[in-house]
Amino acid sequence: MSDTSLPSDIGFGAAPTADPFQAAKASALKAAEELRTAAAQKASELRNAAEARAQQLKASAGQKAAEIKSDLQDKTEDLRAYADEALGQAKQRYETLLAEAENLTREKPRQALLTAFGVGVLVGLILRR
């Protein structure tokens, strides 16, 4: 007998067997498609997670900005009140000094005139330089 015998599963009405390379190729294509689908799904999940995190960060930043704005408004109001108070005190001091200068001028007119002349000469010398 010879070694060229036919396989026992092939009979006269049996279907021919498929090529093993074709089966491997089909299996590889199917696995690749499954990997593509899984990768697309993971990418979508990551995109959704990133968008959710971005929304959280945006909300947190908005809240922090509102807090900072509120703090700045409070500090601005405090500074405005301080400036108004300082201005009021300066006006009061100016009016007091002006009243004292008027009284001194009425009481001692010669001394006031000589003092004003001296100050004028001093300022004139300083401005020439």
Image (cartoon, rainbow, N blue to C red):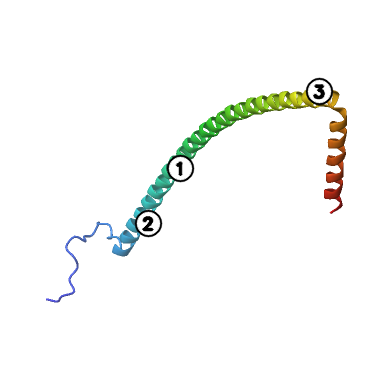
Query: Considering only vertical position in the picture, is 57 above or below 21?
Result: above
Residue sitting at 45 percent across and 39 percent down? 53
In the foreground, 113 or 13: 113
Cα–Cα span, label 2 and label 1: 31 Å
Element type at mark 2: helix
Residue sitting at 74 percent across and 23 percent down? 96
Residue sitting at 70 percent across and 24 percent down? 88
Which label lies toward us, 1 or 3?
3
Q: How dense is the environment of label 3, judged by Cα within 10 Å: few (below 14), some, or many (20 and up)? A: few
Query: Considering only vertical position in the picture, is 21 above or below 112?
Result: below
Q: How dense is the environment of label 1, judged by Cα within 10 Å: few (below 14), some, or many (20 and up)? A: few
Q: Is residue 19 left or right of residue 91?
A: left
Residue 110's spot in the image, x, y percent? Answer: 88, 31
Q: Who comes first in sequence, dot 1 or dot 3?
A: 1
Residue hosting label 1 = 50
Q: Amino acid at mark 2?
A: Leu
Residue sitting at 34 percent across and 54 percent down? 31
Element type at mark 3: helix
Residue hosting label 2 = 29
On the rendered image, what quadrant is the N terminus found in?
A: bottom left
In the foreground, 58 or 106: 106
Report the disc number at residue 64: none
Residue 38's spot in the image, x, y percent? Answer: 38, 48
Mark 2 touches mark 1? (CB < 8 Å): no
Residue 83's spot in the image, x, y percent? Answer: 66, 28
Q: Amino acid at mark 3?
A: Asn
Cα–Cα span, label 3 and label 2: 108 Å
Residue hosting label 3 = 103
